[in-house]
Image (spheres, rainbow, N blue to C red):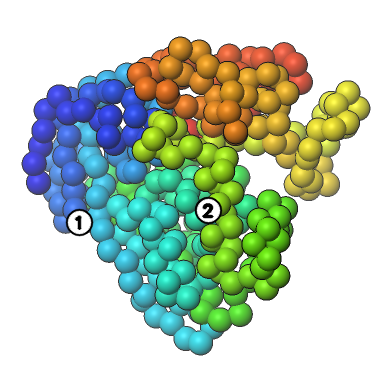
Amino acid sequence: MTISSDFSLKKYNTFGIEAKAKTFIAVENETELAEVLKKHHSEKPFILGGGSNMLLTQDIDRLVIHVNLKGKNILEENNDYALVSAQAGENWHEFVLWCIDQQLGGLENLSLIPGNVGTTPIQNIGAYGVEIKDTFVSCRAMNIATQEIVTFDKTQCRFGYRESIFKNEEKDRFIVSSVTFKLTRNNHKINTSYGAIETELARLNISNPTIKDVSNAVIAIRQSKLPDPKELGNSGSFFKNPVISKTEFEKIHSQYPEMPHYVVSDSEVKVPAGWLIEQAGFKGKRFGDAGIHQHQALVLVNYGNATGKEILAVSQNIQKTIFEKFGIAIEAEVNII
């Protein structure tokens, strides 16, 4: 382990924001993580994973611990299912492809989502009709204050829409070190419920898709809509899709009958934030080096030298405008640092 001072985090956040860490250290296993936390936990260290779900608006004037634990393996399996574990520092998309290569299904709809395995249960990441909670079994997490390892099962994680116990009651108290999933070995539950997947499969003349076909379709869709963070700084979807009451929805829908929506329950409706942003005229707009992607209004981008504060200002402008136009409050999905 090497501690570096005045360390640039530009390559450690997918927005490509230039920000400095007062001190920086990468840990490769739980033993190193415990050692560093025991020595520095009173300093409230900043925990860094894949850097895909955050916007840095300032330098970090404390120790940054980069969780770089690697490894993945099949814990047990039978003809129907397999329990698969991956360490927190594994790249998420590479892990999904590895599972598909092992003929294990359940994660294919989550292909090409940026970030590392360790942050997936924190955010309960989801896409194209699937969320982490659908295959999640448990995760190991280290208590920052005591260095005790605790295992959280699905119930204990209290998953919600882009929510978990790690973003609420246990926020900043634990570091996820590994995650275990239950994936199908046979009789895969192919999920093409989102129309874009069905359209892409039809374009490829695939009527009986495999898990690999679904993954390829999702990758093609995401690549057509979303910029590669290596080429254009971004963190994927910047905002959550707002969930509003049915009464509130009916009132707004009477004014905008073309507004797409998804019924969540008898009393709640989800509205696509991207549609709201596009209707407000932001899609493709640029404010200096900060802007909104031309193909996906949910994605804010750094065209080169934008600061985190400039991107934050754009996001706040969008939120203010959406509320004034539709009366709907949209929340940031990314963490503002």
Alpha-carbon neighbours of circle 2 within 10 Å: few (<14), some, or many (≥20)? Answer: many
Q: Amino acid at mark 1?
A: Asn
Please state the horizontal and vertical placement of residue 329, each as a whole percent of the image. Answer: 67, 24
Quarter containing the C terminus: top left
Q: Residue at x 54, y 31 (%)?
A: 299
Whether residue 12 is visible here, answered yes or no, is yes
Alpha-carbon neighbours of circle 1 within 10 Å: few (<14), some, or many (≥20)? Answer: some
Q: Residue at x 18, y 44 (%)?
A: 26
Q: What residue is disc 2 on?
A: 219
Residue at the right extreme of this rendering: 254
* Rendered view: 48 above or below 124: above
> Between disc 1 and disc 2, whose residue precedes?
1
* Rendered view: 3 above or below 93: above
Mark 1 or 2: in front is 2
Q: Residue at x 72, y 13 (%)?
A: 324
Q: Which mark is residue 200?
A: none
Q: Is residue 173 left or right of residue 246?
A: left
Residue at the bottom extreme of this rendering: 79
Please state the horizontal and vertical placement of residue 132, each as a whole percent of the image. Answer: 52, 56
Please state the horizontal and vertical placement of residue 204, each as a whole percent of the image. Answer: 64, 62
Q: Is residue 286 left or right of residue 330?
A: left
Q: Residue at x 23, y 24 (%)?
A: 20
Q: What residue is disc 1 on?
A: 29
Camera-nearest residue between 297 and 239: 297
Helix, strand or loop status at disc 1: loop
Could you give the CA–CA distance between mark 1 and mark 2, rounded to whole angstroms? 31 Å
Q: Amino acid at mark 2?
A: Ile
Camera-nearest residue between 199 and 329: 199
Would you identify the image quadrant in which residue 53 lies?
A: top left
